[in-house]
Amino acid sequence: MFETINMKILLPELILICTGLAVILLDLVLRKKETVAFIGVAGALLSAYYNFSLMSLGWSGAVFQNMFVLDGYSSFFKLIFYISLIITIFISLNYIKTERVSSGEYYSLLLFSASGMMIMAGAADFMVLYLGIELMSLSLYILAGIMRERRTSNEAAIKYFFLGAFSSAFLLFGISLTYGLTGTTSIIEVAEALNRLGPAGRNITLIAVIFFVTAFGFKVALVPFHMWAPDVYEGAPTSVTAFMSTGPKAAAFAVMGRVLFYAFGALQLQWSAIIEPLSIVTIAVGSILALSQTNIKRMLAYSAIAHAGYASIGFLPGTQEAFAAMINYLMIYIIVNLGAFAVVVIMRREGIMGEELSDYSGLAKKNPLVAFLMLIFMFSLTGIPPLAGFIGKFYIFMGAVEAGYTKLVIAAVIFSAVSAFFYLRVVVYMYMKEAAEPSVLIVPHSVKLVLAFTSIMAILLGIFPSVLLDFARASLLG
Amino acid sequence: MGIEMKEVVFIVVALLTVVPCLIVAFSRNILYSAFSLFFTLLGTSGLYFFLDAEFLAIAQVVVYIGGVTVLLLFAILLTKNIQEIKETNALSMKRAYFAGASSFILLASLIFLAVKEWKFFEAGPGTDYPFLTLNQLGELMLNKYLLPFEAASILLLVVLIGSLVIAKRAVK
């Protein structure tokens, strides 16, 4: 029956889910809506505390007959989710008041979505993995459409929902094919079954791998499965876009890594050959289409597509070292991206959308500090040394070159240079153009905190690159 | 070796599943489509019985026939000008051809692979599924599969909250 000790392993997820439930109930009672948000942050911190204290106590392992694991791999990704969740809550505080979104549902859906991601990262069975993905995605569909009176928000939710459901069908097809061929849904047992089948019998499971890559391609927005991303990112509330382009993207990479490395590790050469063209096309399309965007959310959407391409290069060598470089890259990307979105969020004020690039004209005169921080984020996203973004790209490229993907890396570096054009255009608007009309920019304290954290991390991780990478390596080992 | 009784029943059930499917796709009247869907779902339930998955078969009847089809009929009943749906269907003919062609290619390649490797037709290791009674199924759900079961309950809660968010009146 129940192994009471092992239930502890689920504590981080349980705490977050209970916080989500508490938030939606307390929202009815509490007058001051900020309190609800802080309960959410407290829940996330408590959950993080338990997760890492369980890890340090050596309580890691599998529960429910290998359905769910707590290991270094999932803990590293959970750290990404906690950062993404807490920062999103902080930047939402004032934003959702301006947009008149009701706070109870908003925060609880954020928390449920984050718990879905945590279930994804810890899933050791395809069934749990699928339910985690659905929990995350369903919450996101609703969050994307939470501004019901705005048409773009509705459009975003509908598009996201349909394409999400479509990709779920691919995922289920992949899972059912795998089950049919190996007789199990457990990730470890699938790997064992593939070893038993031998090279000849294994090849037929490649069709399941194709379905998996397609499904995850939709979730991380790899070209040609990226169509939904720009419209959804533009239409969704900005704070939700910030969340969507960070946590869920990392979660999709977490399950992709778990499935490809742990379950289909025997087919590494084959799936590398599938991902290789996808990654370079993704980088190319993302970088080129971002050039013509005038809306900053759309621009950041294409930038997110390109970054998913860079990150997926980390899969190609199929080594633990390259994968460590990839999760290192993801951590850096989400911190910098959240910082950039924090600036986009404060540009939205009563009566001003603040989403067009022209809205950034003269920001350097209006608010030099915010403009400077945005400059740091844009430089970091481009990958200019000594900032963190450079380090992330550097390790990814180095791993790929060592594995013999030189041509691919040269192409990626060229597109990285192309991307400088649209990132630096924001800087040009801020520093070299005059403001159309004088309007004050008020930075709420919560966003100040976020800007301070993200910009300091963007600089520190660039100066001390080995700290995060060593942590990533250590996480993959245990 | 002639065709045995079991095979005859299987062919009937399979036809009951597939033929109404075609009506669902090609009928110009959406009401006919909805009623054909009823038979398709019934046929699917029959296929589940064939696979000894009785619980799934009954759940199929309760959820899809009792729930989804009835809901669909209500939706048709309550929608105005439902007959004009033909025009929107005609708009996307190109896409329909594309979708049809790509699913045909997919199906053909699956059949090709299955015949070539001869793998789909023999059970893999450990796939001889045990016969399960409802009691055993319930025990499994609260034992081995407790985590997915509970995760599904949270999922449904989120769906409930989501439908309320979408349906509620705008905040003044």
Image (cartoon, coloured by chain):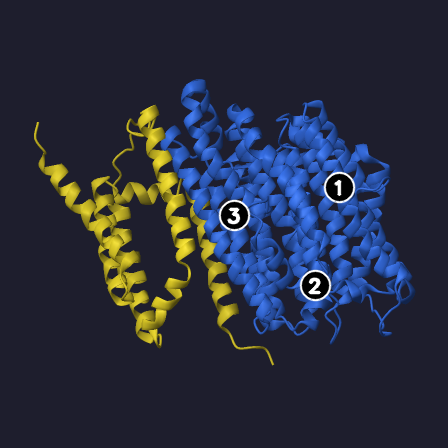
Chain colours: A blue, B yellow
Which quadrant holds the C terminus of chain A? top right
Residue at 41 percent of width and 44 percent of height: B102
Q: Do the residues labelled 1 and 2 touch (CB within 8 Å)?
A: no
| Residue marked by disc 3 | A133
Separation (CA) of disc 1 from disc 3: 31 Å
**Residue A422 at x, y = what percent?**
77, 52
Residue lying farthest to the bottom in this orientation: B172
Mark 3 residue type: Ile
- Say if A201 sits above or below A26 in the image: above
Disc number lying in front (1 or 3): 1
Residue type (three-letter) at the residue carrying disc 1: Ser
Residue A276, can we see it? yes
The residue type indicated by label 2 comes to Ser
Check disc 2 and report its element: helix, strand or loop: helix
Which residue corresponds to mark 1?
A416
Chain containing mark 2: A
